[in-house]
Every structure is written in structure tokens, then in C-alpha cells.
Amino acid sequence: MGKQLTEMLKGTLEGVVLAILLGRSAYGYEITAWLRDQGFSDIAEGTVYALLVRIEQRGLVDVEKVPSEKGPPRKVYSLNAQGREHLEEFWRTWSFLTERLEQLREGGK
Amino acid sequence: MGKQLTEMLKGTLEGVVLAILLGRSAYGYEITAWLRDQGFSDIAEGTVYALLVRIEQRGLVDVEKVPSEKGPPRKVYSLNAQGREHLEEFWRTWSFLTERLEQLREGGK
DNA sequence: ACTGGTACATAGTAACGCTGAATAGTGGCG
DNA sequence: CGCCACTATTCAGCGTTACTATGTACCAGT
């Protein structure tokens, strides 16, 4: 997909990760792998970790360090109340955008 | 809406403008006004002009200077073949993203 | 002359994702 | 033991994009 998707992901990738964390808690490496499975094949590892640091500093997630059998300890993230609120706000903004875009797409035919 | 929408617009605003220009040619001031009407109330004028310069330099649009009765001459933009191709590519990327997001939204319920 | 509406342009700033590399622990293989 | 693969996190530097703020220019009405 390339550069176009890269730019579109700005602002939405955070929502994607929050949405993942709504279902279950997870750690960075796991989230990266999951994203690749879902078709976001070219998302850099570093991007996910930076994003996680960001949402942690904003207080949207709780963090727990869990020792791993294979490698260094995992930082397991889980969505807290504030994070759930932020996620809802994200979906509202997303809906606004998709509605406008869908209108434009229809109109152009 | 605020900052969240600002970030989401990155990468999509260009597609929005191209989609507008698919229907009919238009000039910057007109596009800005139209965007405000459609609910993108906080898009700055400067943003639109900068975007138009960008897509012109990439060769996605043709430009014609048309004298205006009220003020300085208008720069009227119209989508050319390369621009239409780029727009189609944009819709493909957009579809990819919306499908993934919709899945996530469903799964989270 | 002054104000207001039309129309375009640009310099500086902030946010976000990518690149590329470094660091570190564990287990398996020869 | 030494090397490699896998797991897991972190960081510096970069490019792209949208916003802020400001400036230029032209014309009509009062």
C-alpha cells in the first residue's frame, strides 16, 4: 500500500490499538504481530512501541510488568476507564469522517 | 471535534479535495467554503492552499488563471488523468482502512 | 478614505509514523 | 562453549501533513 496508508494511519492507529486493548490486555510484541496478521503488514515495530508509550503517558492504559519465559519481561497494557472514554470519542470522530467521505464517494459517481 | 480529527485528516484531506475536483473544477477559496459547509468547520484556509500547491507540483491537477470580478484572479484547478488515477488509489487505500476498522468495531461489541 | 468581502500565499510550529539501530534475555544446535 | 534465532523493548533522526498567524492584492459601497 505504501505511503498513502502511512499518512492515513496518523490519528487512526492509536484508535486501532485502543480498540484491540478493549477486548483483552496485550503487550507490544503481541500487538505488532496481530496487526501484521490483520493486513497492516508494513507497520514498523518501533511505531507500536512509541504509540504505547504515548497512551501510557496520557493515562489511557494501565501497565503491568510480567516476566516472560522467552526473553525480557513483557509490559502488558490494559485499557482503563479513561481509555474507554477516549476510544468512544475516537469512534465518534471516525464516524464523522467516514460519513463525509462516503457522501463524497457517492456524489462522484 | 478538535485535535483528534486534525490527525485523522492527514492523508485523507488530499483525497477529499481530489474527490471534489472530480465533479467539477474549483478554486481554493471555493473549496474552503465548501468544506466548511460540509461540516469540516475548522479547516484553515492556509491548509487548503498549501494542499493545492502540493497536488499541483505533483502533477495531479491542471491550473488555469481566471480573472475575477471581485478581487485577485482565481486559480482554477481541475483533475487530470494522473489525478484521477491517484484518486482511485486513494479510494482503494481508504476502503482497506475502513474495512479493518469496521471489523475492529464489530469485534469490540 | 475606510471598511468589508473576495482570493491567494507563506513562514514557523506541532504531531505522528517510519527508518535503522542498539540493547537484552532465553533456548537450541553443532 | 560460541553462535544464532526468537522474544521484547527503546531511542535518535527524518519526512509528511495540518494548524497558526500574518501578509498581499483587488474591488464595491458608504
Image (spheres, coloured by chain):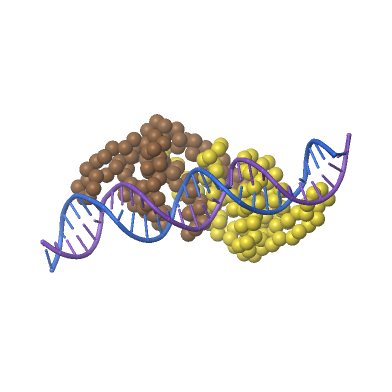
Chain colours: A brown, B yellow, C blue, D purple
Quarter of the image for residue B108 reads top left
Q: Position of residue B21 (x, y in %)?
A: 67, 55
Q: Position of residue B98 (x, y in %)?
A: 50, 48
For residue C1, side relative to residue A29 (left or right): right
Query: The C terminus of chain A is located in which quarter?
Result: bottom right
Q: Can residue A74 be spotted in the picture?
A: yes
Give the residue displayed 66% in from the left and 42% down from the top: B36
Looking at the image, which is closer to me, B9 or A104? B9
Q: Position of residue D15 (x, y in %)?
A: 50, 58
Quarter of the image for residue C4 reads top right
Looking at the image, which is closer to me, B44 or D25? D25
| Residue B55 vertical placement versus B8 (above, below) | below
Q: Can residue A35 be spotted in the picture?
A: no
For residue A57, side relative to residue A98 (left or right): left
| Residue C3 vertical placement versus C11 (above, below) | above
| Residue D13 vertical placement versus D19 (above, below) | below
Q: Position of residue B86 (x, y in %)?
A: 58, 60
Give the residue displayed 40% in from the left and 42% down from the top: A54
